Image (cartoon, rainbow, N blue to C red):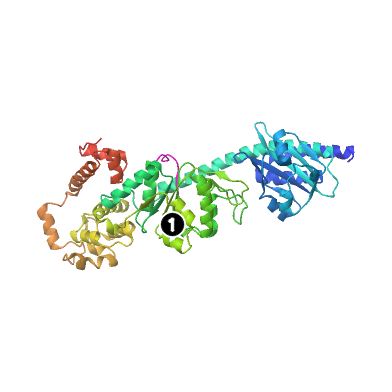
Amino acid sequence: MSESQVSNRTSQIHDLATAFARRLDADELIPFALERSREILGADGVSILLLDREKRELYFPYVAEGDAEAGRRLAEVRLPADRGIAGAVLQSGRSELITDVRRDPRFSSTADDRTGTATGSLLAAPLLSESAPLGVIEAVRRAGAQPFSEAEKTQLELLAGSIAVALENAGRFAEIKQVAALLRAQNGALRQELARNDRFAEIIAVSPAMSEVFRLTEAAAASIKSVLILGETGTGKELVARAIHRIGARAEQPFVSINCAAVPEGLLESELFGHRRGAFSGALSDQVGLFRAASGGTLFLDEIGEMPIQMQAKLLRVLQEGEIKPVGDARSYKVDVRVISATNRDLEAGLAARAFREDLFYRLNTFTIRLPPLRDRREDIPLMAARFLDMACRGLGKRVAGFSPQAQALLESADWPGNVRQLQNEIDQAVALAAEGELIGPQRFSRRLGAAAPARNGFPESSADTGISDSTAAQSEELGVEGSLAKARAEFETRFIAGVLARHRGNVSHAAIALGVSRVTLQKKMKEYSLRGN
């Protein structure tokens, strides 16, 4: 190469430094830098190997190759950071010119084997930032081509210096973008949490079956990272997951949930692990994914039994290795997330049918909480019905007088195949249909539920629209019930809270969990009703 050619290329390299610096997105910078470097050096291929500091490995985020398929295969290669020519350059911080790599014992044929090429001459220069090495840039010519010269080695060094500065700036820019994306994802989850109209604001229960659930919930929150919640549809599995998060050490961190059955199979991997821009059609920007959005907190995987078998394998790898790999990304990212999963399916039957992976089942099933159906905890129905009635009245801005004895008996004796969710739906409908100040009777419930009222409960019904029988009205008048609902409720709450406190030996924290309220809420009630605890 003549002196004028060398001078011209050096001038080009200085001009490129400005062009590199203007590109703050690494996805744009790296391809541009490598293509320009390949042109200037007359190389058959140029690649950047970035350092994965956690794994101490070098990987190819992008490769400028004439053969696109060879470049794709090379992008899957990861090399030990302390071996080979690239490792030596990284460790020494000095560039090298190898005229014939076959005579260099440090040369690894891994890249050649993957790409189906034969390297002859190689240039390698370190990418050095102010704080730490970023990686190595390599240029290759195939066997039989003219080897690189010392002048071209100097040119690569100049290119490496400009690219390293641009990469460091792009890295800082990417960190800012990732933090912003993470905050957006977490804030989005928080907004959904605040805006979401919970099917049940709190877990309301006094039954022995639910007392056992509360005990297990408290135990899981204290020590277990992976929890599996089993129960029929509508039993409140997500509420238990939220309770585990709320009373555990991760309470101040995000709680993020996803219904695995509601996301199309092709998008589930991207939703969970994130993706890089351009990874697939429609991926217009980077997405961090729910695992990273839940970093430090809890990820709730509802309907885990519906997860496709291919995704189960990828989820298992994440749980085993504690890291995720976004779709279209060359590197993995460490995640620290408590995973709580739930299903209404029989997973053991799924194992037999090969619809659910056995290794994933045992990974998720380190601690199991089974939620009883509503028909097995009928003691809780009066409390839940009263709570849902109050919620529906406040939501509709309507006042009703409560449930008639027939309606109350019907609620307590129904089978409730839809569990708590069905109970709330029935009460929401009844309040919507009821007149202002009405005492709700069975006819305000759905035909499916209300038709069974006389046969089940043996209560005579009046034909009046209010659903109040003559005998019921007479009883109410006789007992002086009219106008005293607030007083009756206060008296009931006093007795009920006192009983729960006594069962938990005055422990306010345990009683609050059993009642499904916060400790602060319980303390306010105790003060209001002059109750004592410890």
- The residue at 40%/50% (across/down) is 196
Q: Answer with left or right where residue 444 lies relative to residue 352.
A: left
Q: Which residue does the image show at 41% across and 46% down from the upper left?
A: 194
Reply above or below: 95 against 348: above
Residue at mark 1? 303
Residue with the most extreme front position: 105
Q: Residues within 10 Å of mark 1 (few under 14, many from 20)?
A: many
Magenta span of residues: 248-256
| Residue 285 on image: x %, y % | 59, 49
**Residue 253 counted in the magenta span:** yes
The answer to whether residue 398 is left or right of residue 296 is: left
User: For residue 517: magenta?
Assistant: no
The local secondary structure at tag 1 comes to loop
Instruction: Say which of 237 and 10 sits in front.
Output: 237
Near-viewer residue (379 or 438) = 379
Residue 487 in percent (x, y) is at 18, 46
Left or right placement of residue 31 versus residue 485 in this view: right
Q: Position of residue 1 (x, y in %)?
A: 88, 41
Q: Which residue lies furthest to the right in this view?
A: 2
Residue 508 seen: yes
* Residue 164 position in % (x across, y down): 70, 37
Q: Indicate the amino acid at tag 1.
A: Glu
Q: Choose between 70 and 442: the one closer to the eye.
A: 70
Q: Does 388 sit left or right of 124 as displayed?
A: left
| Front residue of 106 and 98 | 106
Which quadrant of the figure contains the C terminus? top left
Q: Is the magenta stretch mostly helix, strand or loop?
A: loop
